[in-house]
Amino acid sequence: MIRDNYLDINKIVFDKKIFKLFYAVQSHGGVLRFVGGAVRDALAGIKNFDLDLATDLSPEELVEACEENALKTVPIGIKFGTVGVVINNKTLEVTSLRKDIKTDGRHAVVEFTSDWNTDASRRDLTINAIYADENGTVFDYYNGIDDLEKGIVRFIGNAGQRIKEDYLRILRFFRFYSIFGKTDIDSKALKACIENKDGLRSLSLERIRDELQKIIMTDNAAKTLKIMFDNDILSYFLPEIKNFQNLQFLINLVKKYNIPTNFYRRFFILYNPDVSLAQNLSSRLKFSKKNRDLFIDWATYSDVTLPDFENVNSLRKLLYLHGREFCFNKFLILVSLNLKESSHFQDILRQIDNLDIPIFPLKGKDIIDAGILNHHHISDVLQQLENFWIENNFSLSFNDLFAQAQNLVSQINNQD
């Protein structure tokens, strides 16, 4: 189906210099179109800055066309038909029309074609097989526009066959359903996902993790994940999840107050893990050291409770001991686990952001000045004094603490 001037091309094009690429392809006898996510999201009113383009020129012909028009190219995936074209220091991916010759569930052997319908037929979902030219004319080979408007997410052709071509399409299906689905999940697609779920085992951890992260970051993640785990889609990879309601509460909460979303916070809510499980999950998903430490800290300090945030003195202690990032996330986690928004929710967030964090007045040299003889005791003395300072709500001055230090040092020197 062709719809003339159907799409406002300004929703896709943010740099008019891209039209030079369209001219280059056309001057070489070819056709260039936007495809996939950019077109789909523009039609759905979602901002998408990732541009994918397709052409009926072969990779070699595309490179030649660009060279003739002084456009720089980068061979980022020639084997699979993808050429990078540099526009204003940004590399756009342009892929030649293809058809699959052989697939193994992870990779495909392709052959180039000039048939747009054939290229569309190898894509996964109807809503991802919509093309648009530089004038906004849309080419919809599998009624993707109708499906998008109705909120129907389905595979092109035989769902099982599409999945067998790349098992990651199981997770992609659930991700796009979570974003665009407005109806009950497509029964044929779900059946095919269940029948082929073992194929996910053949994929790399990184591909599984990245797609799972995208699902968890959608607004309807709780509903979608429940469908997935009710049907054991990822049971081989992750433990059972129970806190779907808490996740949805968190999603609604951060949306209400325009709080930046955070994958690790959402993932933690799903399990509310103890330390052992937090270590297991962070290792399994290969979190960075920073995110792993933060994730495990949320579990380690399980004795931190909501009342600790509602008292200024106890909140200041938390900020001193753990920092703002920990306190901010731990508070959101606790509220979501409690399924009840605190009456002082915004005030507490402001305090977390604005309360001054005290600085411990003493340093190691001060303990030396207090007369310590055995320097191996310095850290122990500092720790005792710091604990005493915290217990007194940071009210003790340098002189107060130094006097305490002298008493402690005297006792230690006498014992030694």
Image (cartoon, rainbow, N blue to C red):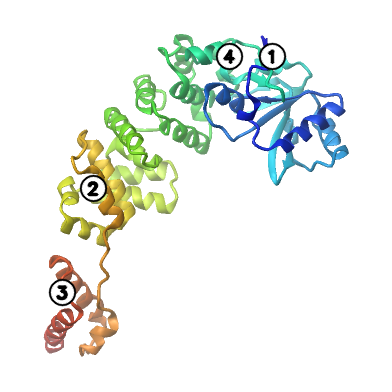
What amino acid type should be assigned to the residue bearing mark 3?
Leu
Q: Quarter-wise, where is residue 235 in the image? A: top left
N-term-proximal mark, 2 vs 4: 4
N-term-proximal mark, 2 vs 1: 1
Q: Which numbered dot is residue 90?
A: none
Q: Quarter-wise, where is residue 182 in the image? A: top left
> Which residue appears at 66% of the width and 20% of the height?
131
| CA distance for labels 2 and 4 | 46 Å
Dot 3 alpha-carbon crowd within 10 angstroms: few under 14, some 14 to 19, many 20 or more: some
| CA distance for labels 2 and 1 | 53 Å
Q: Which residue is mark 3?
A: 396
State the image coordinates of residue 137 (x, y, percent, origin top left).
69, 18
- Element type where label 3 sits in the image: loop
| CA distance for labels 1 and 4 | 16 Å
| CA distance for labels 3 and 2 | 27 Å
User: Is 359 on the left-hand or right-hand side of 43?
Assistant: left
N-term-proximal mark, 1 vs 4: 1
